[in-house]
Amino acid sequence: MKIESLRAEEAAVLAAAQAMCAAARTAPKACGIDKLDSAILTGADKDALSAEMRRIAQVDGDAFFIRDAENVDASQVVVLIGAEEKPRGVDRVCSLCGWDGCADCVKHGGKCIMNSVDLGIAVGSAVSVAADLRIDNRIMFTAGKAAASLGLLGDKKLIFGIPLSVSGKSPYFDRKFNR
């Protein structure tokens, strides 16, 4: 049996994306509470994400959303990793959010710092898997904002997108930013 390089590369990038989701799930969590979710986008779902990134660029005037949408278009898949924003309920023991306990944080529309930290650790764990497998990747808040806008991880709004590419040259290397 002969497997052409394109088929092998597609299989490798999808396997890497699956391993990245597993790495995000098993990453350490504050208080041992898992408030993370992940998903893999391909095909039409990935195209919808890049279209939403372009729409956001038109509304907000942020040109780097277009640059990042082009990177998503050049990628085989996008891994989404997101976290809930609800506080952990450790109350005054923590207060790292800047408020006087979890109820005060919610009252003032604050964000639980533990969820952000968990998301950062999970994303770092996931991209280390991609790097170990020699899959080009880039962490993008722009893809995460578009994913949140589309509701791709339910009601989660704290999301990062990680496009993955296997090609002769990384599409994320010589990125240009024009304001």
Image: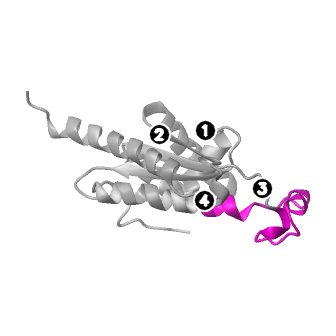
Which residue is drawn at the image coordinates 61% and 38% (left, top)? 152
Q: CA distance from mark 2 to mark 4?
A: 19 Å
| Disc nearer the start of the sequence (4/3) | 3
SS at badge 1: loop
Q: CA distance from mark 1 to mark 2?
A: 10 Å
Relative placement, left or right, of 171 versus 52 is left
Which residue is drawn at the image coordinates 56% and 69% (left, top)? 179
* Neighbour tally class for label 1: few under 14, some 14-19, many 20 plus, Cα within 10 Å: many
Disc 1 designates what residue? 152
Q: How is the image coloured?
A: one colour
Of the residues shown, which amino acid type is indicated by label 2?
Answer: Ile
Of the residues shown, which amino acid type is indicated by label 1?
Answer: Leu
> Foreground residue, 153 or 179?
153
Q: Which residues are magenta?
A: 91-117
In front: label 4 or label 1? 4
Disc 3 designates what residue? 87
Tag 2 and tag 3, C-beta contact below 8 Å: no
| Disc nearer the start of the sequence (2/4) | 2
Tag 1 and tag 2, C-beta contact below 8 Å: no
Of the residues shown, which amino acid type is indicated by label 3?
Answer: Pro
Disc 4 designates what residue? 118
* Neighbour tally class for label 2: few under 14, some 14-19, many 20 plus, Cα within 10 Å: many
| Disc number placed over residue 40 in the picture, else none | 2
> Residue 130, percent across and down?
35, 55
Of the residues shown, which amino acid type is indicated by label 4?
Answer: Asp
Q: CA distance from mark 1 to mark 3?
A: 22 Å
Q: CA distance from mark 2 to mark 3?
A: 26 Å
| Disc number placed over residue 97 in the picture, else none | none
